[in-house]
Image (tube, rainbow, N blue to C red):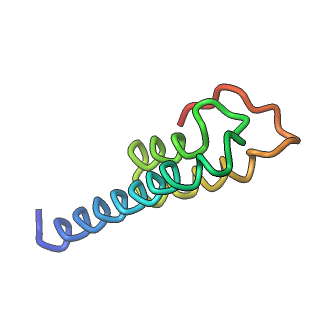
Amino acid sequence: MNLLAILAQAAEGLLAETMIFLVRLYQFFLSPIFGRQCIYQPTCSHYFIGAVNKYGPISGLLRGAWRIVRCNPFCTGGWDPP
């Protein structure tokens, strides 16, 4: 591997860990205040973490954002793993 590829991989890992850290902060501080609102199982925040771990930070962010858009009273919800 060349240096550029190693740096890109490290930056991708750092971005993924930062995103997961921010979601964990949300889960710890804000989620208890808002209460359970998600119609899906696993919840949108758990889905987001799973998507980032499985698909990487960019694709995981897009998949997580799409999941949050779908999480509304007009959707049926249910089991939807990343």
Residue lying furthest right in this view?
74
- The answer to whether residue 17 is above or below residue 39 is below
Residue lying furthest bottom in this view?
4
Figure label count: 0
Instruction: Return the residue nearer the eye: 3 or 76.
Output: 76
Please give the name of the residue rendered at 45% of the width and 56% of the height, measured from the top-left corner: 25
- The answer to whether residue 53 is above or below residue 42 is below
Residue lying furthest top in this view?
79
Relative to 61, is 75 on the left or the right?
right
Please give the name of the residue rendered at 39% of the width and 57% of the height, measured from the top-left corner: 21
- The answer to whether residue 57 is above or below residue 70 is below
Instruction: Return the residue nearer the eye: 38 or 63.
Output: 38
What x and y, as percent, mark residue 46? 51, 40
What x and y, as percent, mark residue 43? 60, 38
Residue 14: quadrant of the picture = bottom left
Q: Quadrant of the N terminus?
A: bottom left
Residue 16: quadrant of the picture = bottom left
Relative to 75, is 41 on the left or the right?
left
What x and y, as percent, mark residue 49? 46, 46
- The answer to whether residue 1 is above or below residue 48 is below
What x and y, as percent, mark residue 13? 28, 59
Please give the name of the residue rendered at 57% of the width and 57% of the height, measured from the top-left corner: 62
